[in-house]
Amino acid sequence: MPKKNNSVALPSRMDLAENAFLDFKIAVLMFPFSKEVQYFRNKIQEVLRSKKKIYAPYRQLNNGLLACSSTLTYGFEWLKTVDYVPQYQALAVGKAEEISEKLPTIKQIHDLIFTWAITWTKQYTNKKNGNKDEIETACDPFLDAIENIPKSWKWEYIEPGTLIEDINSNNGLGYQAIPSLLATLLHKQTITIQLKDRKQKITWRKVQGSSSSRIGLHLVSQPFKANYIEEKKNNEDITYQEKEGYFAYRLDFHAQTQAGRFNNTGYLKPWIFLHLSCQRYAHESQ
């Protein structure tokens, strides 16, 4: 039987306080041109006589949105498919005053979408091969269709308590919004970790998702310097060299439900899981 090791970090899970986010807001915004994008994709594929399916470069658009607005939690990510047309939704969570004052306006987002569409179509209109007139008959109507801001397009606001009560409401938005709310809640907060006589202060900073598979917000600490031993093999010889580098702690939140675990109103009650990891920094050329 293994000996008990008090220095091992175990996975943590906890309940979520119902009043945890009283001063917070959630805002969502639907992508308004899903049908226009779908039609253009099909049309340009037909014009180019391409056997490969053409996809809209949403990742490029979302990277631009996040670069221009630190208030956004994530850009237009897939939400659901309606009548074979994918629907995309952007999310922003934060303190009520931050959402009210710093949320990008509809006009600002539309300007970026239109610039993105122009950049997307240019890769086809600048092609040397293919029928230029046919390509323009696909690109020009697409740009015309999204040039104006839809009248009914606006941010919609959701109370955090609504998602805490029923995490599966609003197309399961709580699974993305609640972890991001927790990251926002702990932003700039400081904790102290201690191992025997050694203490270390950690100040958390919220960070937007760093890859296509990780959207939403997570926390990272300030960088720490660390010494480590690098092993090098040269034929049968092994040498050891002490080096130093930098790393930071990363904290991710995940919301999950458990069968048969309900709250007082009869909805599934979520667990909040914490995942602590380390990430290294590249600080010198190889």
Image (spheres, rainbow, N blue to C red):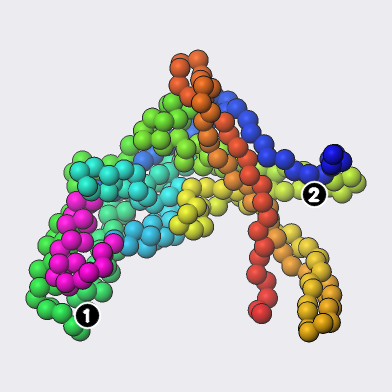
Residue indicated by mark 1: 127
- Quadrant in the picture for residue 142: bottom left
For discs 1 and 2, the disc positioned in front in the rendered view: 1
Alpha-carbon span between mark 1 and mark 2: 57 Å
Q: Is 50 a magenta residue?
A: yes
Task: Report whether residue 22 is seen.
Answer: no
Three-letter code for the amino acid on which mark 2 is drawn: Gln
Q: Is residue 147 left or right of residue 90?
A: left
Give the residue drawn at x 43%, y 50%: 74
Residue 73 position, x and y percent, is 46, 47
Q: Which of 268 and 278 is in front in this view?
A: 268
Q: Is residue 239 left or right of residue 46?
A: right
Q: Residue at (83%, 75%) from the top-left corner?
A: 241
Q: In this view, does 31 lie above or below 228?
A: above
Q: In what quadrant of the picture does the C terminus appear?
A: bottom right
Could you say which disc has been placed on residue 200 in the image? 2
Toward the viewer: 225 or 286? 286
User: In what element is the residue under mark 1?
Assistant: loop
Q: Residue at x 36, y 41 (%)?
A: 28
- Principal secondary structure, stretch drawn in magenta: helix
| Label 2: how many Cα within 10 Å (few below 14, some 14–19, many 20+) | few
**Stretch of the chain drawn in magenta:** 33-55
Are the two marked residues, 1 and 2, in contact with CB atoms closer than 8 angstroms? Answer: no
> Which quadrant is home to the N terminus?
top right
Local crowd at mark 1 within 10 Å, few (<14), some, or many (≥20)? few
Res. 88 mark: none
The mark that comes first in sequence, 1 or 2, is 1
Instruction: Give residue 35's position: percent from left, percent from top.
Output: 19, 51
